[in-house]
Image (spheres, grey):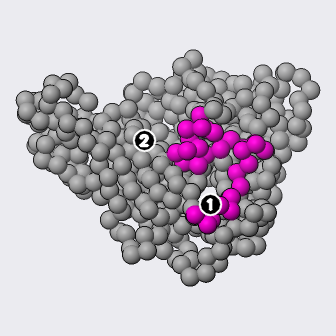
């Protein structure tokens, strides 16, 4: 927030229902609306939204049968699950789009949104965060036997309430956004819902065709309205809003020496992080489409730019050789994996390893980390999963690396990928790119 006289500031809470609501108030890919749209109008006076406190509130209900006419709650002994790290609400979102009404353009469109959340939650939070605050916010739980992520029968009869943040870059910039006529001119937020087969998973979920719906939706966000001399001072100049936008790209890995190379077309890349899942599991309701799959017997990684090692002048080595072993015989294997883990944590947090806090990536707890496990471990969501991923931090301080016309590539040396469908991995890549929104009475523009 800009410097202002406290006497000139009025704090308000904006509460909005979706603008595309129907009479039933239900949103679902099964029979209701699959798209949720919120419209935040512009204001005449400078009004800054505290986007870090923006929440989507509502209720999620799991059921079988026909929506609206013959809904039946999920049985108590059903093997019906949802992903614990994703949580109830975020697990339902396919794409999230945020647009400036004044710019008449999209600020950020996050594709494969629900695949980002497991990495963000498990890399940035410990079990206390997840099982307490995040559990109440968005239905997150650690992937263990104590916090078994069942679709519970009481949720199907009454629904379960949530008050969840949105994990887009624009909402997590650490700055307030002016939505006045001289600012962004208001915002539109669109959430496209995933099909039920990619949300509720498990053997009984597939047999009984378990579905979900969202209802009672309200968006809330604190807003600070400037008045008096503070408003006049703020309106007279040019103001900026800097944020990391998220660009998602999907690739496949199907050989022991897989190389993914592309030109992202982004000018200020802060980091890139990736997670994976067996391609045969995607869209099959028997399996958890949001789990962070073990990436097999990963032996080394190589990040490069135009074919040259970058930003690390070395390969990242890993001694993981036996992913079907649950108990590790020596500490050498653990130490060998630490290079990959440290880079991944830095890339998700966009911060050097020395500044990082709690994380679920550990080897000393049975319910988390990336202990050696088979590539298909926890695919049915009924057993312990992992929180594995890979990534690389390019710049933590705002300058970023230019990949507008240069080739980004990453090479995986992985002995378990043999070209068959059973071992092929779907790789979800997320580039964080710094953007700046410039706003003044004369106009608005985005520097990408």
Q: Quadrant of residue 77?
A: bottom right
Q: Can you identify the residue that label 2 sits on?
A: 169
Q: SS of the residue at dot 1? A: helix
The front one of 279 and 64 is 64
The front one of 312 and 298 is 298
| In the rendered image, the vertical position of residue 83 relative to residue 404, given as above or below | below
Q: Position of residue 34 (x, y in %)?
A: 48, 69
Specify which label sits upstream in the sequence, 1 or 2. 1
| Residue at figure coordinates x 69%, y 25% from the top left | 339
Crowd rating for badge 2 (residues with CA inside 10 Å; few <14, some 14–19, many 20+): many
| In the rendered image, the vertical position of residue 261 relative to residue 426, given as above or below | above
Q: Residue furthest right?
A: 329
CB of mark 1 within 8 Å of CB of mark 2?
no
Instruction: Say left or right for 265 vs 241.
Output: right
Q: Quadrant of residue 408?
A: top right
- The residues tagged by marks 1 and 2 sit, at their Cα atoms, a distance apart of 31 Å
Q: Residue furthest top?
A: 354
Q: SS of the residue at dot 2? A: loop
Q: Quadrant of residue 46?
A: top left
Instruction: Say left or right for 24 vs 126.
Output: left
Give the numbered dot on residue 155: 1
| Residue 135 visible, this angle | yes
Q: Position of residue 422 (x, y in %)?
A: 81, 58
| Residue at figure coordinates x 20%, y 51% from the top left | 42
Q: Position of residue 365 (x, y in %)?
A: 77, 31
The front one of 431 and 257 is 431
| Residue 252 visible, this angle | no
For the C terminus, give its image quadrant.
Answer: top left
In the rendered structure, which segment of residues is drawn in magenta? 129-158
Q: Position of residue 50 (x, y in %)?
A: 33, 38
Instruction: Say left or right for 192 vs 159.
Output: left
């Amino acid at each position: 927030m800009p410097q202002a006289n406290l006497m000139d500031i009025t704090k308000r809470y904006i509460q909005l229902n979706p603008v595309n609501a129907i009479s039933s108030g239900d949103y679902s890919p099964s029979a209701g609306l699959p798209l949720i749209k919120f419209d935040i109008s512009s204001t005449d006076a400078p009004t800054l939204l505290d986007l870090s406190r923006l929440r989507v509130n509502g209720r999620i209900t799991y059921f079988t049968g026909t929506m609206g006419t013959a809904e039946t709650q999920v049985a108590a002994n059903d093997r019906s699950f949802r992903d614990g790290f994703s949580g109830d609400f975020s697990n339902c979102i396919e794409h999230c789009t945020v647009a400036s009404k004044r710019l008449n353009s999209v600020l950020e469109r996050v594709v494969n949104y629900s695949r980002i959340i497991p990495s963000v939650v498990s890399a940035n939070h410990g079990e206390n965060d997840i099982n307490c605050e995040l559990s109440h916010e968005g239905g997150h739980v650690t992937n263990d036997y104590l916090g078994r992520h069942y679709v519970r029968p009481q949720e199907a009869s009454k629904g379960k309430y949530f008050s969840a943040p949105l994990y887009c870059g624009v909402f997590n910039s650490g700055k307030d956004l002016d939505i006045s006529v001289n600012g962004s001119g208001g915002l539109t937020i669109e959430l496209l819902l995933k099909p039920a087969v990619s949300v509720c998973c498990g053997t009984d979920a597939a047999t009984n065709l378990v579905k979900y719906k969202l209802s009672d939706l309200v968006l809330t966000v604190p807003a600070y309205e400037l008045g008096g001399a503070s408003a006049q001072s703020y309106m007279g100049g040019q103001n900026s809003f800097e944020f990391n936008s998220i660009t998602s790209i999907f690739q496949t890995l199907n050989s022991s020496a897989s190389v993914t190379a592309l030109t992202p077309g982004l000018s200020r890349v802060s980091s890139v992080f990736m997670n994976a899942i067996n391609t045969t599991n995607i869209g099959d309701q028997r399996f958890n489409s949001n789990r962070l799959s073990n990436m097999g017997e990963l032996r080394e990684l190589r990040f490069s730019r135009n074919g040259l090692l970058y930003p690390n002048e070395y390969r990242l080595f890993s001694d993981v050789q036996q992913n079907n072993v649950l108990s590790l015989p020596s500490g050498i294997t653990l130490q060998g994996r630490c290079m990959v883990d440290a880079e991944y944590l830095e890339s998700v947090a966009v911060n050097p390893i020395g500044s990082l806090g709690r994380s679920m990536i550990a080897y000393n707890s049975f319910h988390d980390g990336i202990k050696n496990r088979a590539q298909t471990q926890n695919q049915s969501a009924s057993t312990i999963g992992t929180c594995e991923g890979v990534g690389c931090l390019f710049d933590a301080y705002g300058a970023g690396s230019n990949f507008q016309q240069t080739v980004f590539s990453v090479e995986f040396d992985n002995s378990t990928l043999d070209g068959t469908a059973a071992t092929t991995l779907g790789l979800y890549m997320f580039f964080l790119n710094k953007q700046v929104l410039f706003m003044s009475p004369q106009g608005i523009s985005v520097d990408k």
